[in-house]
Amino acid sequence: MSQLVNLQVQTREKRGKEAAKKLRANDYIPAVFYSPEGENISLQVRVGTFHKVWLKAGTTSVVELEFLQNNETVKKPALIWSVDKHPYKTVYMHIDFYGVDLTKEVTVSVPVEVTGKPKGAEDGGVLEIYRQTLDVTCLPINMPNQVVIDVTKLTIGDNINMEDVKLPSGTRVDFEENFAVVGLVPPYQEKTEDEETEEGAEQEEGATEESSADE
């Protein structure tokens, strides 16, 4: 479960591309804190400081932003909502912090993690993960870092559907359709030359029939 992680940041007054460029040149990352209550605060954070917290918290653990505002220390619980990186350089371009109320539920996209070796793997079954993430709803401090699914009992043709996924206490995934999250499918088979020739002939025949119908 998530633990509150402290992150020291600073407010910033200057905005725009040039100001952001100067910040990055001085080892800072431009950022913004916003909340459902309408707060919007421009911030900056040192690269090294953020990197350590980012590795620990990811997008699911609550961080406690701490900064000076009007000569007073302010603390804001938030989620690291999005991190923009440079397309090919190891540079953080911008960070969005989403303010949360620790007493109110929030919905976050949480990664799916599978554990165990499927029983049917011995027969050549291939594990398919249909959902890489699940939208989990709970109090911010209870948000899991991942949803772990045990696939040990799967045989070929089996699926683990959403209603079968065991979630941590106090968390839920709202869904109308009981969709498959992971499954074990038959081994992939390459088509033989004869099968490819037959398939090509069928496609050609279908195209000929369609052309005749148009005439």
Image (spheres, grey):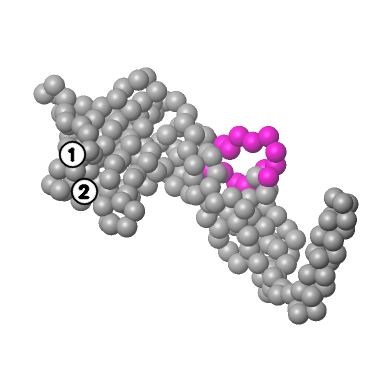
Residue drawn at x 60%, y 56% is 129
x, y percent for residue 207: 81, 60
Q: Which residue is mark 1?
A: 18
Vertical comparison of 197 with 51: above or below: below
x, y percent for residue 210: 84, 55
Tell me which secondary structure the magenta stretch mostly adopts.
loop
Q: Secondary structure at mark 2?
A: helix
Q: Which residue is mark 2?
A: 47
Vertical comparison of 55 with 137: above or below: below
Viewer-nearest residue: 189 or 181: 189
Q: Quadrant of residue 10?
A: top left
Farthest top residue in view: 37
Farthest bottom residue in view: 193
Question: What is the three-letter code of the residue carrying label 2?
Answer: Val
Label 1 Cα neighbours within 10 Å, binned few <14 / some 14-19 / many ≥20:
few
Vertical comparison of 169 with 200: above or below: above
Of circles 2 and 1, the one toward us is: 1
Work out whether mark 2 precedes mark 1 in sequence or the reverse, and give the earlier one: 1
Viewer-nearest residue: 28 or 208: 208
Q: CA distance from mark 2 to mark 1?
A: 18 Å
Residue 117 shows up from this direction = yes
Numbered mark located on residue 138 in the image: none
Magenta-tinted stretch: 163-179
Viewer-nearest residue: 73 or 127: 127
